Image (cartoon, rainbow, N blue to C red):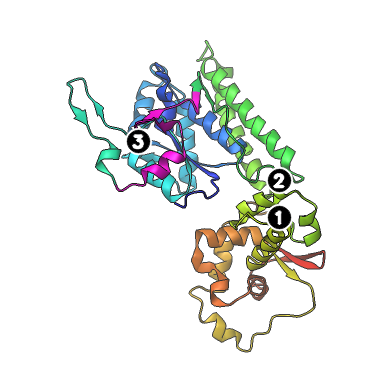
Amino acid sequence: MVLGRTRVNVVIDGSNVISGGCSKSSDSDGHRLISAIELYEKKGYTVLPRMKNGTYWWMKKNDGKASRGFEVIDRLVREKKKLGIDILIEDDDLYIINLALEKNAWLVTNDTFENYYNKDGQEVLRERATYPDIKWSELDQYTWGTSPDREGRVRTNEDWRVDGSNFLHPRLPQAPGMNIKDDNSQLRVLLADLGKILGEIEIFAENHPDQDSDHINHIKMEIGHYRARHKKMIDIIPEPGIPSSRDELGSVTVDVLKHYCSILGVKKSGLKSEIIDRIIKQLSNTGHEEKNDGNEMLMEDMNQILETLEFSKNQFVSALMSFKKSKNERQSFANIYSRLIDKYPRYNLKDHGIKPSWFLQECGGIIDYEIREKGGYKHYWI
């Protein structure tokens, strides 16, 4: 984990949030975790919820008694499994600690991981004592829900709290880059609000006095279908694009330019002209744009170059398309390629001296792409 790096990921201690954190809630409520996920996603964060396996089975056994909202948690577990993600963990505390460090994420929890004394007066050792090599100072700096006191002991704080089934984080900032507006900004907000309304309907149906009525059972069933459609609508919206021409970049404020830098993972300091140069260079490196000067890349021995790769064209295209959110709409090659090499560096064509846009054209027989020209630059869309 690099200290000071922009954080757009959030790891949620699901078991802690479901139980109400430090609020001493008398019950567990699965809707709190759903509320937290929706809140952070609405603010633009990528959310990684995790929870203890035992919490899941306890909720199933006690649903309607000391626990509420098992259905929404069960649905969340199943939806994540379809994506190849298992959010149920045995040793959840150690797992979420390491996940937050690995993903450079904020950690949402009221768990201090400090030792405590049981009712017999015996000290119970926790993670801070048993795993001293963990970068605790870095973790503490990027945890929402705890903070060190003057003596250095970590205590819970009021970063977030629960109110019934709702999760609240009053001073939560927008995720870096969320002030970048495009044609779909309002649509994203409306869909986020729709998710909130669906959640309210679901909670009302679960608390309805006539639980056995046909219309309540039917509503509960339909909510699940609407949740799936709601998620599909969110996924098909293209991500905000970053302008590549000097004129377009020069027309926005320095704050917006710095958000572009955060998205691209480049240095943000310097004069406005320097920041613009840096953005254009990075966009070029990821294949975002190509100067339309009529000069094509020359390869004296293309086969020799391709033989240096550890993957085939088909493997590259398959990996690339797996990061495409919508199958029916074209998306920026640069944005998709950037996500691909961030997750799988082996596909970084620059490491082999190959220009990404050239390689995309070489794959033209197995992938459909389009070139759009703007401001004297070529933009590739797939």
Q: Say which mark, if any, is on residue 242.
A: 1
* Residue at screen point 58% across, 38% down: 41
Please rate how many residues cluster around mark 2, counting C-alpha atoms within 10 Å: few if below 14, some from 14 to 19, many from 20. some
Q: Which callout, 2 or 3, points at the residue further toward the start of the chain?
A: 3
Residue 296 included in the magenta stretch of the image: no
Quarter of the figure with the C terminus: bottom right
Q: Amino acid at mark 3?
A: Asn
Residue marked by disc 3: 53
Where disc 2 sits, the SS reads loop
Q: Position of residue 162 (x, y in %)?
A: 49, 22
Q: Residue at x 56, y 36 (%)?
A: 40
Labels 1 & 2 near each other (Cβ < 8 A): yes
Marks 1 and 2, Cα distance to the nearest angstrom? 9 Å
| 180 horizontally vs 74: left or right | right
Q: Between marks 2 and 3, how big is the CA–CA gap?
A: 38 Å
Q: Between disc 3 and disc 1, whose residue precedes?
A: 3
Give the residue type at disc 1: Ile
Residue 287 in picture, x, y percent from top left: 66, 67
- Numbered range of the magenta stretch: 133-161
Q: Which residue is mark 2?
A: 180
Answer whether residue 360 is visible to the viewer in this image: yes
148 in magenta = yes
* Residue 212: x %, y % from top left: 50, 15
Q: Residue at x 47, y 28 (%)?
A: 71
Query: Viewer-nearest of labels 3 and 1?
Result: 1
Residue 290 vertical placement versus 241 (above, below): below
Q: Amino acid at mark 2?
A: Ile
Q: Nearer the viewer, residue 63 or 283?
A: 283
In x, y percent, where is residue 247?
81, 59
Tell me the crowding category of disc 3: few under 14, some 14 to 19, or many 20 or more residues within 10 angstroms, Cα based: some
